[in-house]
Amino acid sequence: MFSKILIANRGEIAVRVARTAREMGIQTVAVYSELDRDALHVRVADEAYALGGSTPQESYLNTEKILEILARCGADALHPGYGFFSENAEFARAISNTGVTFIGPPPEAIEIMGDKISSRIAAQRAGVEGVPGTTVAVTDYEEIIEFGELHGWPVAIKAAFGGGGRGMRVVNSKEDAKDALESAMRESEKAFGRSECYLERYLSWPRHIEMQVFADDHGNSVWVGERDCSAQRRHQKLIEEAPAPNFPNDLREKMGDAAVRVAKACGYRNAGTVEFLYQGDAFYFLEMNTRLQVEHPVTELITGLDLVEWQILVADGQPLPLAQHEIQRRGSSIEVRVNAEDPSHGRFLPSPGRIVRFIRPDGPYTRTDTGYESGDTVSQFYDNLVAKIVVWSDNRDKAIKRMVRVLKETKIEGISTTIPAHLAILEHPDFQQVEYSTKWVETKAGLESLQVQTHPYAEQSDTLVKKTVVAEVSGKRVEVNLYLPESDAPASSNSTKTRERPRNPVSHSHHSSAGGGSGQVTVPMQGTVVKVLVEVGQQVEVGQSLLILEAMKMENAILSEKSGVVKEIRVNAGDTVGTGDTVAVIE
């Protein structure tokens, strides 16, 4: 068994993996960016090493630095979590080439299934049909127009090397094709380090149901159970549950068998998730995620299994703990993703900032997976997931009621979160009666009338200063860098200001992107300007996109709320802006 595991990730998944490893008697090593120096995943690990940098590309996507730390810390295994490098075959191969075990599938399986295009081909070889789509990367928007004219609109552009809705755009007409492809490729590059995209027919009213699979080195492959992930916004999951409600058992068995066939077709090993779209009485292969899913806790609660433990055991060369007929599922489990977003009017605007207070829920069969505590900062540079709250009960109706009670007990102050949207969804008759699809949240859930009242917090900004001091360690004189609040660190020639935690964003009740029609175009969130779409002197109309702002790995169009002429543009592509900053003036 492994003696030490390096967890090449951050946030709640890094904490989650560390806890199981500790229960198994395995030491853990955390890595952290400049902004994550004091993060919870760093605090729970046995050791922690600095990656440097702030953005994902500078830190958690820096292969050379991770390999350097791997050699220094002496870990004999690496767990990639999800996101970042979890589905990167080159990274997995680089880890394996050092003699360290990669806790995940072999690189060859990632190459087949991590690439959503080749995974479609593999699924077809296994006799599992997918949604009509392309099997080569799209390189020009004219290809989207040709596909749409042939198969019908809308068309989905999807990241070939990603998941979680990142890099996905729905194109409703040929006029939207060019901008949608550019946006999808930009977002995919930033989230996964690869920009390739492919096309799929966008189904009218499907449910998103996925199957958890596991395989070992001894020829054993099983499906553990399915999850319904249909409550989505921006093609990203909000609520997941297991088992899928109103899902016939004969289809469950057929889907499980199909998922295992897909896994075997690529020589799979370890944990994986085969995703399907379910509409009418048929299901279609969507993609395979070659990693542990964000929503794996609902499967754990209905089976009583620790899927991270299974991952570690399989990576160690041991056989699966259970055969297919030994896996039992009981009751109903629901998970909600508490994201740092303001769901007012159904817009789900990113809401980075400092968490002033975080009171986690408690009670029977209640679980909270999080990477944050009170006082921690949710950065604009990373994913916006603050916590996963999961409940179990012996039936779905009781599980829904339990989750409603749990969410009302949860208190998160200083940032806006998706909790009000979760409550609206859970209490909606359509959700309770399973009359929804992946499009329901954005079209029929009624969130456009949701108004979240938030209040700014005038907390003192916590500026950290690097101070170099001389210390003696085991009789050896060494220089040590300390990071202290500015008020506690006396100024000196060897002190430098390194970062300032952002003040809590002031939440605007209207959350408009253009200053209420005044002509002062302000931004409702911290972020980085990706692209300026207009120029000084240009005539613009109400609702026209003025610029693209990236925050928390999502691109957001900043719209004009006034018709007129652009008098000023105060930002350029690459600039960082804060909540309430004026970026343009229209008169």
Image (cartoon, grey):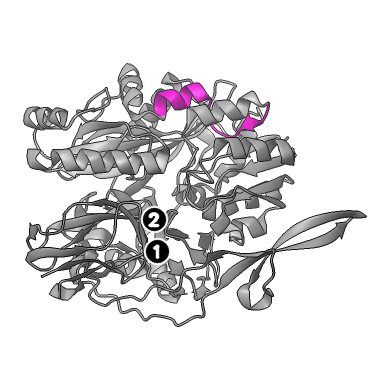
Residue 465 appears left or right of 560? right
The residue shown at (58%, 46%) is 306
Asked if residue 215 can be seen in this view, the reply is no
Query: Disc 2 on helix, strand or loop?
Result: loop
Observer-nearest of 496 and 58: 496
Q: Amino acid at mark 2?
A: Met
**How busy is the neighbourhood of tag 2: few (under 14 within 10 Å), some, or many (20 plus)?**
many
Observer-nearest of 38 and 170: 38
Can you say whether 13 is above or below 453 in the image?
A: above
Observer-nearest of 79 and 324: 79
The disc label shown at residue 340, or none: 1
Q: Amino acid at mark 1?
A: Ala
The image quadrant where one finds the N terminus is top right
Can you say whether 165 is above or below 254 in the image?
A: below
Q: Quadrant of residue 348?
A: bottom left
> So how many labels did they put on this image?
2
- Residues at discs 1 and 2 in contact (Cβ within 8 Å): yes
The residue that label 2 is drawn on is 552
Q: Which residues are magenta?
A: 99-113
| Precedes in sequence: disc 1 or disc 2 | 1
Query: Disc 1 on helix, strand or loop?
Result: loop
Residue 290 appears left or right of 533? right
Observer-nearest of 434 and 57: 57
The disc label shown at residue 243, or none: none
- What is the residue that sits farthest to the front in this orientation? 493
Q: Residue 424: where, in percent of width, then height?
A: 28, 68
The residue shown at (13%, 29%) is 142
Q: Residue 32: where, in percent of width, then height?
A: 59, 51
